[in-house]
Image (spheres, grey):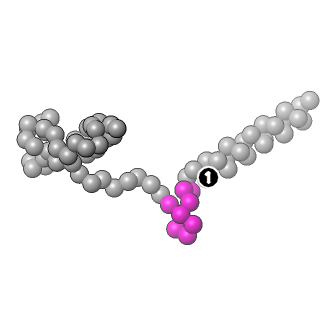
C-alpha cells in the first residue's frame, strides 16, 4: 500500500514522498544522499476527557442544524 512519508537526509533536507509502506530510505532529490524515513507526528486533535474528535462532531452539529433550518424555512414558505 502506498502512503505519504517524510524522509530526511544527513544534510538536513526534508522531503515527502508517496511510497510503498515497506520503503525505509530513498535518494534525496536535492543532494542525492541517502534519506531515511522519519517518524512523523499525526495531525489529530482529541477532546481531553472522552477522546472524541471535536472538529468532526462540531461540523456534524453545524450541518445538522443547517438542514433543520432549511427544512423549517421550506415548511414555512408552503
Q: Secondary structure at mark 1?
A: helix
Where is residue 19? Give x, y as percent: 27, 37
30 or 50, nearer to the observer? 50
> Of helix, strand and loop, which mostly describes the magenta segment?
loop
69 or 27, nearer to the observer? 27
Residue furthest to the bottom? 49
Q: In the picture, residue 18 is in which quadrant?
A: top left
Task: Kindly tell me whether residue 13 is visible in this rendering.
Answer: no
Where is residue 65? Give x, y as percent: 73, 46
**Residue drawn 78% across and 41% down?**
69
Residue furthest to the top? 78
Whether residue 22 is in magenta: the answer is no
Where is residue 4? Give x, y as percent: 32, 41
**Residue drawn 92% across and 29% down?**
78
**Residue drawn 57% across and 66% down?**
50
22 or 55, nearer to the observer? 22
20 displayed left or right of 74: left
Where is residue 47? Give x, y as percent: 53, 63
Magenta-colored span: 46-54
What crowding class fits label 1: few (fewer than 14 Cα within 10 Å), some (14-19), or many (20 or more)?
few
Q: Which residue is mark 1?
A: 58
**Relative height, residue 22 to residue 49 (above, below):** above
Residue furthest to the right? 78
Task: Kindly tell me whether residue 48 is visible in this rendering.
Answer: yes
**Residue drawn 16% across and 40% down?**
26
Query: Dividing the image into 4 quarters, which one contains the N terminus?
Result: top left
Amino acid at each position: 500500500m502506498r502512503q505519504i512519508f517524510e524522509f530526511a537526509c544527513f544534510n538536513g533536507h526534508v522531503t515527502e514522498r508517496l511510497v510503498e509502506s515497506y520503503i525505509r530510505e530513498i535518494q534525496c532529490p536535492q543532494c542525492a544522499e541517502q534519506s531515511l524515513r522519519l517518524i512523523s507526528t499525526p495531525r489529530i486533535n482529541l477532546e481531553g476527557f472522552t477522546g472524541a474528535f471535536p472538529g468532526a462532531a462540531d461540523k456534524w452539529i453545524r450541518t445538522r442544524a443547517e438542514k433543520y433550518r432549511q427544512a423549517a424555512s421550506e415548511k414555512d414558505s408552503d
